[in-house]
Image: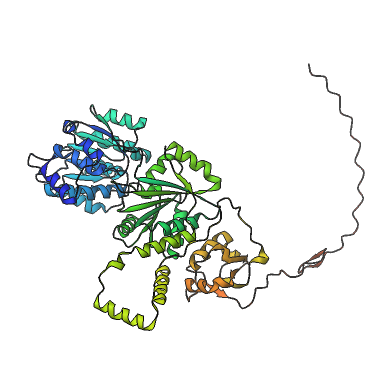
Amino acid sequence: MMQTLRDALDARGYDTLTPVQEAVTAPELSERDLLVSAQTGSGKTVGFGLAIGPTILDDDGQLGRAAAPLALAIAPTRELASQVMRELEWLYRGAGAKLATAIGGMEIRDERRALDRGAHFVVATPGRLADYVRRGAIDLSDIRAVVLDEADEMLDLGFREDLEFILSACPESRRTLLFSATVPPAIAKLAKDFQTDAERVVVATKGGQHADISYKALQVAQGDEEAAIINTLRHQDATNAIVFANTRATVARLTARLSNRGFSVVSLSGELTQNERTHALQAMRDGRARICVATDVAARGIDLPDLELVIHAELPSNSETLLHRSGRTGRAGRKGVSALIVPMKLRKKAERLLGTAKLSADWTVPPSAEDILAADEARLLDDPVWNAEITEDAKVFAAKLLQRHAPETIAAAYLALYRARRSAPEELQAPDAKPQKRATESFGPSKWFSLSAGRNERAEARWLLPLLCRAGDISKDAIGAIRIQDTETYVEILETAVPGFLRAIGPDMSPEEGLKMTALDTAPDLSRGPRPERGQRPDRGPRPDRGPRPDREPRPDREPRPERAERP
């Protein structure tokens, strides 16, 4: 290994290399093309950075003046490409490396200027890089090494033509390192067409697939899925957690629900701009947010530090997606938990997914409210604050407290303040409980409100119900009848939930821009008035007497039909 790279590893605190890093840096493979299979989170990025070192560095472990790029690293998504960029920057800083990007969603002018100034490395996504090559904005004639990271994902996303075009534009003498979690026929063909006598490297993790991840299948009753997510987040109290959903709409709903419950949460979905996605990930990295709610496509390839918990709010469509989601945790030797939220009607699907992925899960139920409160107490008792040195100011204030209150009162108040900073746990039904229809008469005392939108504005209960729950921080059980009229809508809200509802929507009484809400003193009159008597038309008076119908002449008799000949 080149000395500059070894120094970078020492400064980063690398005591030992991971299995994949050891495999790809073997001396006998220093000039070979490689087809590498290894699970996500195994240290592949640093691995291929070390592997191409002998190909692009001089004998002193340095890089000369930056001109046309010497190496390409291609990744399927913007987030993964940005991660590769960060890893290569610290690994090759001592070698004097200059890096440039060709990443979709980034500012084109800045990238073109960096390429014009010269770069040793170009980190890219396939679409943007292929576009630069076609426009003549990048010179690939000096390329010595090309790395395709997560190659199977790139083919799944439809980048095959772009990859073939890019590889065809590179010199035939280059080294090609292809990293892929699996090797389907399409990857095997890509390797055959664009690699020369490639060495197949398979790195198996001790203990099987994702050995550092503990899988839990949490069985829940229908309708308790979101409550189970809240309880799981509260019980685990992970430094960082990611919640996966299948659609953008679910991501938006879960983000709003968790935010209303006091969690520090960000979201990732395809509708966000690159700048918004970058800020969301940075908030997770610097601790301003602890939970990320994301779709599969938006979260593909992201690497969050200290990610301890993955929750599958909705079951993935296949086992590959399950493995990919779960692989966001348990990385580089750290432990993690992958929790599947499984309604009873989807148990068979969950069993098939786990079986196909060859994973073993602990089938259980989500943490109860009692479990969460007990975990809070245990964390409170083990908090390092008890062993911290007491300052003089703290001693003075502690003496004041002890003069005013008994020690038991102070301890109880401290516990209450501790719990107040955290979301209250949810009460869950038994997993096999059948959904109960609420009787109208059992709704309880309520208060009515009017909304400034009705049938003329195409108001619908299926739109208003989640809107009011989100804006007023209440559950759907706190909302009774929703009666839509032509120009306004009447909503019934449980009396005990009204104070919190009013605090949440604010003094302007506007749950959404352009929508006003008014409290009513009494229940609205929803009667339609007396029905008109039979034979009467509203506003038109009685129907006129048309007199008796005229007699009709009898119809003439029809001729008998001729008999049909028998069919042969």
Q: Position of residue 413 (x, y in %)?
A: 41, 74
Q: How many marks?
A: 0
Q: Residue furthest left?
A: 60
The residue depicted at 49 percent of the width and 51 percent of the height is 365
Residue 518: quadrant of the picture: bottom right
Tell me which colouring the rendered structure shows: rainbow
Which one is in front, 555 or 528?
Answer: 528
Q: Position of residue 210 (x, y in %)?
A: 35, 42
Q: Position of residue 204 (x, y in %)?
A: 31, 35
Give the quadrant of the N terminus: top left
The residue depicted at 15 percent of the width and 51 percent of the height is 11
Which one is in front, 13 or 518?
Answer: 13
67 to the left or right of 166: left
133 to the left or right of 66: right
Q: Position of residue 135 (x, y in %)?
A: 24, 43
95 to the left or right of 279: left
Q: Is residue 508 visible?
A: yes
Residue 127: quadrant of the picture: top left
Give the quadrant of the C terminus: top right
